[in-house]
Amino acid sequence: MIALIQTVVLALDIYWWLLIASAIFSWLYAFNVVNSGNQFVGTIGNFLFRITEPVLAPVRRFLPDLGGIDISPIVVLLIIFFIRQFLLTTVAPLVI
């Protein structure tokens, strides 16, 4: 059971970094820091969008409109942090 908890925590950690990478990439793309015509840049952006958008889209529906500011990645990161801490501090000690 500990192995399962550790695997879920690892998956949450990987997704944490993918969310951060997606947010940074969207800023770089919005401010024309990266070349939008480059196929490699487009592939990376498409991958990050496809991997994070299924989680971010439902969160955006519940958040108020803040103009051009998207705080859905912050909300999802907080949810991931809560789940990770719950698994490590509450569930893991029960199965040891």
Image: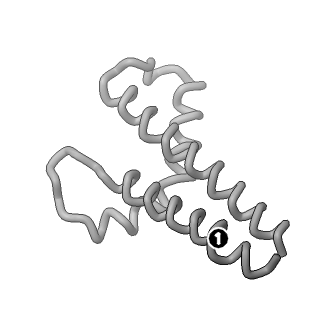
In the displayed structure image, the side of residue 9 where residue 81 appears, left or right: left
Please tell me whether mark 1 sits on a helix, a strand or a loop.
Answer: helix
Q: Toward which corner of the image does residue 63 lie, by quadrant? A: bottom left
2 or 48: nearer the viewer: 2
Here the colouring is one colour
Q: Nearer the viewer, residue 61 or 16?
A: 16
Residue closest to the eye, 83 or 62 = 83
Q: Is residue 96 left or right of residue 73?
A: right
Query: Residue 15: x, y in percent?
Result: 60, 52
Q: Amino acid at mark 1?
A: Leu
Determine whether, in the image, residue 84 is placed left or right of residue 30.
Answer: right
Reading the image, the residue beneath label 1 is: 87
User: Image point 52% across, 20% down: which residue?
Assistant: 38
Instruction: Report the side of 80 relative to 36 (left or right).
Output: right
The residue located at (36%, 32%) in the rendering is 27
**Which is more toward the observer, 44 or 27?**
27
What x and y, as percent, mark residue 62? 28, 71
Q: Residue at x 44, y 20 (%)?
A: 34
Give the residue at x 57% y 43%. Answer: 17
Q: Quadrant of residue 24?
A: top left
Q: Residue 66 at x, y = what percent? A: 16, 53
Name the quadrant of the C terminus. Answer: bottom right
Viewport quadrant of the N terminus: bottom right
